[in-house]
Image: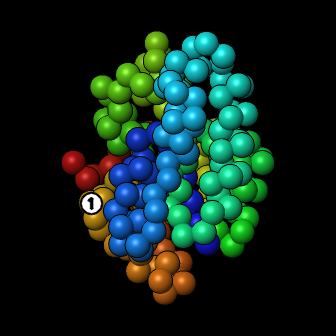
């Protein structure tokens, strides 16, 4: 089984994934990092030279390969969910899919100084994040076995909650929040 972490850019997939993998004694694989390793250059550079469609094809092949590996925590790129083939690969092989959900306000705060994410360059990141959230949130939810709100808990608490829930085979707690609307403010500040 693989635990596949999905969510918006900045939702904490790699950070939570690192701690969750350690707690489970599994390997963490980050699909974006694996793509960059194979390409020998950054995803941003690939986007600039070859476009998003070329990147999405590489991403699809990588997700298919990584999602089939046992004993792995897989942190996916935020847009991996866009392709049906990726959604099927993530759900396949008895995998567990966890949607790390964050409000648009939290994402904008976390990514305000990011210069590496191609889809957030040369635009107002908060506006772009709202657009991406509206498009992607239903897709993340459609494949998720667990939805965990990352806005109010520490990385360690989230990783421990997931590890415990995965070991018990029970659904992860989904906090009841008033901020299910894109961009809604949270009271975690």
Task: Evaluate whether residue 99 shows in this view.
Answer: no
Instruction: Work out whether residue 11 or residue 181 is closer to the camera in this orientation and state it.
Output: 11
Residue 134, quarter of the rendered image: top right
Q: Residue furthest left?
A: 189
Instruction: Work out whether residue 99 or residue 51 is closer to the camera in this orientation and state it.
Output: 51
Query: Element under label 1?
Result: loop
Residue 126, quarter of the rendered image: top left
Q: Which image quarter is the N terminus in?
A: bottom right
x then y, percent, for residue 35: 57, 37
Residue drawn at the location 42% of the way across and 25% of the way down: 116
Residue drawn at the location 53% of the way across and 83% of the way down: 170
Task: Evaluate whether residue 27 shows in this view.
Answer: yes
Number of other residues with Cα within 10 Å of mark 1, as a class: few under 14, some 14 to 19, many 20 or more: few
x then y, percent, for residue 13: 44, 51
| Figure check: 100 above or below 49 | below
Residue drawn at the location 46% of the way across and 18% of the way down: 121
- What number of labels is visible? 1
| Figure check: 146 above or below 77 | below
x then y, percent, for residue 171: 53, 78
| Figure check: 5 above or below 48 | below
Instruction: Work out whether residue 83 or residue 105 is closer to the camera in this orientation and state it.
Output: 83
x then y, percent, for residue 33: 49, 40
Residue at which label 1 appears: 154
Q: Residue furthest bottom?
A: 168
Q: What colour scheme has been applied to the protein in the rendered image?
A: rainbow
């Amino acid at each position: 089984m693989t635990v596949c972490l999905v969510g918006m850019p900045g939702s904490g997939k790699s950070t939570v994934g690192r701690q969750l993998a350690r707690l489970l004694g599994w390997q963490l694989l980050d699909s974006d990092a694996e793509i960059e390793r194979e390409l020998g250059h950054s995803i941003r550079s690939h986007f600039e030279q070859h476009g998003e469609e070329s990147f999405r094809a590489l991403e699809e092949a990588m997700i298919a390969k990584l999602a089939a590996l046992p004993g792995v925590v897989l942190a996916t790129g935020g847009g991996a969910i866009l392709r049906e083939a990726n959604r099927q690969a993530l759900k396949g092989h008895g995998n567990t899919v966890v949607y790390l959900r964050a409000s648009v306000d939290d994402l904008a705060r976390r990514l305000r100084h990011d210069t590496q994410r191609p889809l957030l360059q040369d635009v107002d990141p908060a506006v772009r994040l709202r657009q991406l959230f509206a498009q992607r949130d239903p897709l993340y939810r459609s494949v998720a076995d667990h939805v965990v709100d990352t806005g109010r808990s520490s990385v360690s608490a989230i990783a421990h909650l997931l590890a415990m829930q995965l070991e018990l085979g029970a659904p992860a707690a989904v906090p009841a929040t008033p901020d299910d609307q894109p961009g809604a403010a949270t009271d975690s500040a």
